Amino acid sequence: MEITYTSTRGDQTKYTASQAVLKGLANDGGLFVPNRIPKLECTMKEIAELSYQDTAYEVMKLFLTDYTEEELKACIEAAYDDKFDTPEIVPVVKKDGAYYLELFHGSTIAFKDMALSILPHLMVTAAKKNHCENEIVILTATSGDTGKAAMAGFADVPGTRIIVFYPKDGVSPIQEKQMVTQKGNNTTVVAIRGNFDDAQSGVKKLFADEEMEQKMKAAGYQFSSANSINIGRLVPQVVYYVYAYAKLVQAEEIEEGETVNVTVPTGNFGNILAAYYAKHMGVPIGKLICASNENKVLYDFFSTGTYDKNRDFILTSSPSMDILISSNLERLIYKLAKNEKTDACCMDAAFMEDLAKKGSYTITESMKKNMTDFYGNYATEAETAEKILDMYQKERYVMDTHTAVASCVYDKYVRETKDQTKTLIASTASPYKFTRSVMEALGISCEGKDDFELVDELNRLSQVKIPKAVEEIRTAPILHTRVCDAEKMKEEVCDILKL
Ligand SMILES: *Cc1c(COP(=O)(O)O)cnc(C)c1O
């Protein structure tokens, strides 16, 4: 049965999957949501026999119903190939009593590669299917990892251009170097004087700017998004939860049907929402444990039912989670509101208006009661560092800072609830991406050492091969030097596109 996509905010226009992928964001500023979450058609035992690519097909075909088998398989084959450093694509490793789902084996060594390796292919296919003549301009705000992964995916893809905005002082040195050395004639990187939320709000504003849309049209361009607001990001992320569960069954770590909890280090709520979708597709997932760093807006939301971004923005050692406006939460709010008697779209739109105007909103008591799938907590900077050291001492396993946040929060959950359910922890980045913070946590003196010296030290210490992504940028020339004020993003885009 065909799945259609509509806005979370009231625009009732129905879009096919490929149209939603192409548009990115609905006209009223809402996010596209499927009219229902499809159920898996295979048992876990059957899925356990499949490769990652075949699992991806089994899951994605249920959401992206207007792509033909041939189209979807071609996208999958092009995405999950030897760009990944292991044929398993996402290995699951057992460390200190939990299962770590390593999502960082792609070309930019963060979990964003899972979706951004395939999004360009889904988009170019969507453009063809919908007879789109315009050049697609991908506009992306990044807290560090999306930008590089999106550029790596879109670089030199015909018919596309990509412009990435990142917060000047809000990303790790390795992340910045990865971005400013990006090759490809169609890529542009801009540092903004502001934080990630400024970048994301600026991008959303540009999407809704009608004058801009007219100018773009006249020049033969149209915008789309590579941020996790694009449904084409979310759907590929559902795959690895299905795959990981099936692999645990196959390895006889769990029985088929046994409940597993999932812990996710969370920023924009995309990765954990994908786990929630997997649960609703039929994967036996129990609690969804939402881990925040000191920007704990989600923890407060799960405890109180009030989302309040009015607080100081803290720069932490897990910068990809330094976010106060967690975009994908809107999709959960919409789903919760749907269980109410009121019109879900109206309610969602009203909350989002409150968020834009006052910086906060409060959901109803009954919506709050329906959030029992989720548990939220957070880890401080000190706790995160301690966890990295503790895991290294116990297992000689080096985690990155984001994964460590998740691992800490998982410990807190177990202490608090005594729940012994087996748990999958999303491991979202290679420690090589956050070398300095990781080495400091391990008690290594970093003063006066540059990031690549630290990379070599981490290599000696962890015995994990230095990823190609890091070796490549060691000596790569800097190709991007644009900097602008957060308020000047529109002017910057006009300048880049010569509008
Ligand atoms: C983006 C990112 C996150 C947060 O994921 P969301 O889907 O935004 O919640 C966590 N860890 C790393 C390393 C990331 O790059």
Image (cartoon, grey):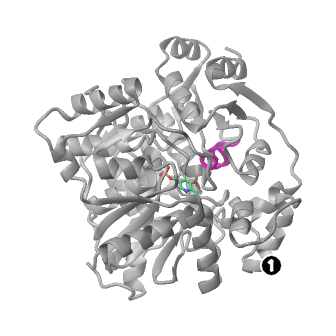
Please determine whether, in this image, residue 84 is positioned above or below residue 177. below
Q: Residue furthest bottom?
A: 252
**Closest to the observer, 463 or 20:** 463
Q: Main secondary structure of the magenta part?
A: helix
Q: Residues within 10 Å of mark 1 (few under 14, many from 20)?
A: few
- Answer whether residue 399 is visible to the viewer in this image: no
**Which residue is located at x 26 percent, y 27 percent?**
10
Which of the 4 quarters of the picture holds residue 374?
A: bottom left
The residue to which callout 1 is attached is: 460
Please determine whether, in this image, residue 334 is positioned above or below residue 376. above
Stretch in magenta: 144-155
Give the x, y percent position of residue 448.
Answer: 89, 59
Give the x, y percent position of residue 238.
Answer: 40, 58
Amino acid type at circle 1 is Arg
Give the x, y percent position of residue 357.
Answer: 39, 23
**Closest to the observer, 425 or 472:** 425
Is residue 148 inside the magenta stretch? yes
- Answer whether residue 322 is visible to the viewer in this image: yes
Q: Could you tell me which secondary element the residue under label 1 belongs to?
A: helix
**Which residue is located at x 30 percent, y 62 percent?**
279
Is residue 430 inside the magenta stretch? no
Please determine whether, in this image, residue 263 is positioned above or below residue 337. below
**Which residue is located at x 73 percent, y 63 percent?**
435
